[in-house]
Image: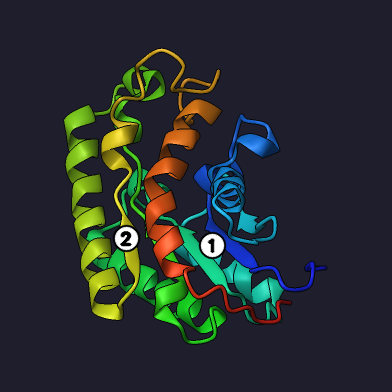
Amino acid sequence: MEIVPDTISYLALGDSYTIGQSVEAAGRWPVQLAARLRDAGIAISEPRIIATTGWTTDELSAAMDAAEPLGEWDFVSLLIGVNNQYRGRSVDDYVGEFHRLLRRAIALAGGRAGRVLALSIPDWGVTPFAADSGRDRQAIADALDAYNAAARELCLAEGVAFVDITAISRTGEAAGMLAEDGLHPSAAQYARWAEAALPVALGLLAGGATASAG
């Protein structure tokens, strides 16, 4: 990947929410976050995104293995886990796999936990897709709350910033907040995620130091 000299390199790791299923590339939340950072005077490159719709934690890890060598990055974001919950996997399984991914993200950021940003898992249970599926929407919310509580604790322990966008996702039935598929966020909702992450990212990148990237 070619990085413009003297810009901060950015690696975004995740699943459908990071690749922006059902929205244009410019609407993806990492792309919107990078644009907002540039508007705020931070020289950051367009993110390299390693994410695919449907990935679980172990599938993201395997994809990262396949993409090696990834090199070192100045800023890394991580948002993963909704497909673990959708497939009925336990919180305990998620904790172990998310923790390993978190440590990999820190390593990719040159060992700097202060250059890693994790986002909470949004609540897909509020969507028309969930209603049509016949699944218990409160059970989905409860499970995702448990996943997110565990992720927050791990981030705290590792010194990684954690941004909770789950509450934003729970306004998903509001006009314009969902993509046409009735499941994934629209670019407008991703904009709200990017706005929530912006002040945290600005704090993490205040130094502006850069590293080489693969």
Could you say where residue 182 lies in the image, as x and y percent from the top left? 47, 20
Q: How many marks?
A: 2
Q: Is residue 54 visible?
A: no
- Identity of the residue drawn at 49% across and 62% down: 77
- Identity of the residue drawn at 24% across and 62% down: 152
Three-letter code for the amino acid on which mark 2 is drawn: Phe
Observer-nearest of 181 and 197: 197
Could you say where residue 186 lies in the image, as x and y percent from the top left? 51, 27
Could you say where residue 106 lies in the image, as x and y percent from the top left? 46, 79
**Secondary structure type for disc 1:** helix
Q: What colour scheme has been applied to the protein in the rendered image?
A: rainbow
- Answer with the quarter of the image where residue 148 lies: bottom left
- Identity of the residue drawn at 41% across and 12% down: 175
Report how far apart the C-alphas of labels 1 and 2 lie in the structure: 22 Å
User: Could you tell which of marks 1 and 2 lies nearer the N-terminus?
Assistant: 1
Q: Residues within 10 Å of mark 1 (few under 14, many from 20)?
A: some
Residue sticking out furthest to the top: 175
Q: Is residue 98 above or below residue 55?
A: below
- Identity of the residue drawn at 30% across and 77% down: 159
- Answer with the quarter of the image where residue 203 lies: bottom left
Which residue was labeled with disc 2? 162
Three-letter code for the amino acid on which mark 1 is drawn: Glu
